[in-house]
Image: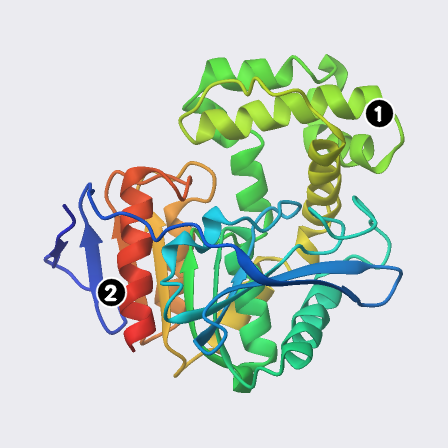
């Protein structure tokens, strides 16, 4: 079961909560979308948008991570479909949006404009916004830009987009999982390993499909290792290559944000109800990110998930997200 405990210290903010290893709290059942559409949003992009839950419920926007991933039915299982009108979309170049893997006119500013276009199209005045990892970062940028449209934020495993995050993922974390890191490096020419990130960006910015396939497999396996899994058996298909193509495009440009701007946007959210949730054992987006966010935004809430990593559907994280979402909707 989940319990809440108070630590002997308390950071700035309304309160700090710690969660134990959980878990018999089930997620909400998968519900089908009641509305699916593609919106023409400029630059040749058609963005896939879906709504599920209660059409008359509390509007909730869920932002997927990556960059380069996509929306899924599992992501909405943290939210009560009887109470929520859940809106999801595949970001430019991602998932079912078209053209797949397209990098032109694909940047964070365009995504923020897309979110507003979706809100206006759906006739929603204000909504709650939730996201994990890159989705949490995008939610922060959106709320800072469109403060009047946001009721509150529930954000998991914040990604700060700066060099320290990327250096950790592409190298630093290898000290904890040396065998998995070596397996990743086997896909990289020895002469390129000293400048790994620059080489990765060139690979996915190019047109060598065979090389992209090999590197995408290694990248995916490394992500899996950081989340406690093993090598992924499924073959690398076009959708997987497109995912890492978009991700490399964004990461090579610090997601068109950078750490300083993300922290600056967080500081502009004062007075907005914000909950940060982070697994203590997250090896993809370090727990220090949400700690820094909580220290930057006085009055926000920080929830540590004991035994939780980056994967949102591991038992500790899933139970914590479900409980936080229920409390968030009741505010």
Element at badge 2? loop
Q: Residues within 10 Å of mark 2 (few under 14, many from 20)?
A: some
Is 247 positioned to the left or the right of 23 in the image? right
Q: Residue at x 55, y 48 (%)?
A: 72
Of 87 and 270, the residue lying toward us? 87
How many discs appear? 2
Q: Residue at x 40, y 63 (%)?
A: 81
| For residue 221, above or below residue 102 | above
Element at badge 1? helix
Of circles 1 and 2, the one toward us is 1
Of 115 and 156, the residue lying toward us? 115
Residue 328 % position (x, y): 32, 70
**Residue 209: mark:** 1
Residue 255 % position (x, y): 67, 54
| For residue 131, above or below residue 57 | above
Q: Earlier in the sequence, mark 1 or mark 2?
A: 2
Q: Residues within 10 Å of mark 1 (few under 14, many from 20)?
A: few
| For residue 159, above or below residue 243 | below
Answer with the quarter of the image where residue 107 lies. bottom right
Is 48 positioned to the left or the right of 29 in the image? right
Residue 188 % position (x, y): 71, 18
Q: Residue at x 59, y 66 (%)?
A: 261
Answer with the quarter of the image where residue 135 lies. bottom right
Q: What residue sits right under mark 2 in the picture?
A: 11
Is 317 positioned to the left or the right of 4 in the image? right
Q: Residue at x 57, y 58 (%)?
A: 259
Residue 296 visible? The answer is yes
Picture quarter with the N terminus: top left
**Residue 116: mark:** none
Is 112 positioned to the left or the right of 202 in the image? left
Residue 323 % position (x, y): 26, 58
Residue 300 visible? The answer is no
């Amino acid at each position: 079961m989940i319990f809440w405990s108070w630590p002997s210290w308390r950071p700035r903010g309304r309160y700090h909560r710690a969660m134990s290893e959980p878990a018999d709290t089930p997620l909400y059942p998968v519900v089908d979308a009641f509305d699916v559409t593609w919106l023409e949003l400029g630059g040749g992009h058609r963005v896939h948008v879906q709504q599920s839950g209660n059409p008359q419920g509390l509007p909730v926007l869920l932002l997927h991570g990556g960059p380069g991933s996509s929306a899924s039915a599992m992501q909405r299982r943290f939210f009560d479909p009887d109470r929520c009108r859940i809106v999801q979309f595949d970001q430019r170049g991602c998932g079912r949006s078209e053209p797949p893997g397209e990098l032109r006119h694909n940047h964070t500013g365009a995504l923020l404009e897309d979110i507003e276009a979706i809100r206006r199209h759906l006739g929603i005045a204000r909504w709650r916004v939730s996201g994990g990892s890159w989705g949490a970062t995008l939610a922060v940028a959106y709320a800072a830009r469109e403060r009047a449209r946001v009721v509150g934020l529930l954000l998991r495993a914040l990604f700060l987009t700066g060099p320290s995050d990327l250096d950790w993922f592409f190298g630093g974390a290898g000290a904890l999982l040396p065998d998995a890191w070596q397996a990743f490096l086997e896909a990289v020419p020895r002469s390129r390993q000293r400048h790994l990130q620059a080489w990765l960006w060139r690979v996915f910015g190019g047109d060598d499909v065979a090389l992209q396939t090999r590197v995408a497999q290694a990248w995916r396996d490394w992500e899996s290792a950081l989340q406690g899994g093993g090598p992924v058996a499924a073959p690398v298909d076009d959708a997987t290559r497109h995912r890492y193509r978009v991700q490399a495009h964004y990461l090579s440009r610090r997601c068109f944000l950078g750490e300083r701007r993300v922290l600056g946007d967080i500081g502009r959210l004062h007075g907005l109800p914000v909950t940060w949730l982070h697994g203590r054992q997250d090896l993809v987006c370090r727990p220090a990110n949400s700690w820094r966010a909580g220290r930057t935004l006085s009055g926000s809430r920080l929830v540590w998930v004991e035994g939780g990593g980056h994967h949102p559907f591991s038992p500790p994280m899933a139970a914590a997200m479900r409980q936080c979402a229920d409390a968030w909707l009741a505010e």
